[in-house]
Amino acid sequence: MSYIDDLFDTLTSLQQNKRLPPLHLWQPERAGEIDIRIDREGRWYHEGTRIERQPLVDLFATILRLEANGYYLVTPVEKMKITVEEVPFIAVDLDVRGSGENKQLLFSTNVGDYIIAGEEHPIHMRGERPFLLVRDGLHARIQRSVFYRLVEEGQPQGEDLLVYSNGLGFNLGSIVA
């Protein structure tokens, strides 16, 4: 087994063993707002001060839920609305296994998620900005340096650039100026 295969297996195993709380079951009556903000770069702030403790940010990310009217941190007893400037997560790294239409693209996020792009985790463009569905309507913006690496994996098809993962092609946009 190669290094990249070992890496993929280790990271996907970590993701599968990550215990996410059953947010969909929690419908607390107590609701409010809290001065927590996630900026466009995925940095978390409380009352204007950056939250520096990464384990705390990672924990908050596991109880984050998107509802029709915004983002909430949810526990069994309360849900607190927070501000998210764009999307809550950032895809900060990319590893590739395989080639052609059979390759797998493994993204790492700023909150410790490891996501293989595919049917359940599509890559999509909003204008010229790339995003990845992480879970339950929560998206990660693909960081610029990671997007450049993603483009290198792309294959021209007509006027578009497609990248493949888990047998699916994702359109990264037009290659015609």
Image (cartoon, grey):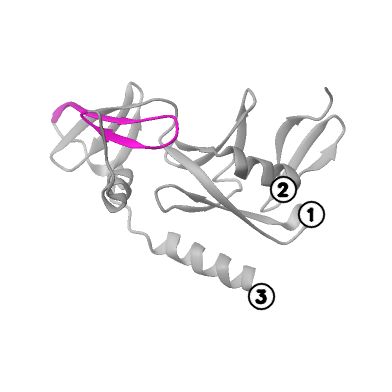
User: Residue 2, which numbered label?
Assistant: 3
Q: Is residue 29 left or right of residue 97?
A: left
Gap between marks 1 and 2, in whole Å? 7 Å
Residue at 71% of width from left, 57% of height from top? 103
User: Residue 164, which numbered label?
Assistant: 2
**Label 1 crowding class (10 Å Cα cut-off): few <14, some 14-19, many 20+?**
few
**Three-letter code, disc 1:** Gly
Closer to viewer: mark 2 or mark 3: 3
Q: Which residue is mark 1?
A: 100
Q: What percent of the width, then of the height, locates residue 26?
A: 22, 41
Of residue 15 and residue 112, the one placed in the foreground of this image is 112
Kindly state the secondary structure of the residue where label 3 is placed: loop
Q: What percent of the width, then of the height, locates residue 24?
A: 30, 41
Q: Is residue 47 left or right of residue 7?
A: left
Q: Which callout, 2 or 3, points at the residue further toward the start of the chain?
A: 3
**Which segment did they paint magenta?**
30-47
- Vertically, is 2 above or below 96? below
Of residue 101 and residue 4, the one placed in the foreground of this image is 4
| Residues under numbered marks 1 and 2 in contact, where contact means CB atoms less than 8 Å apart | yes
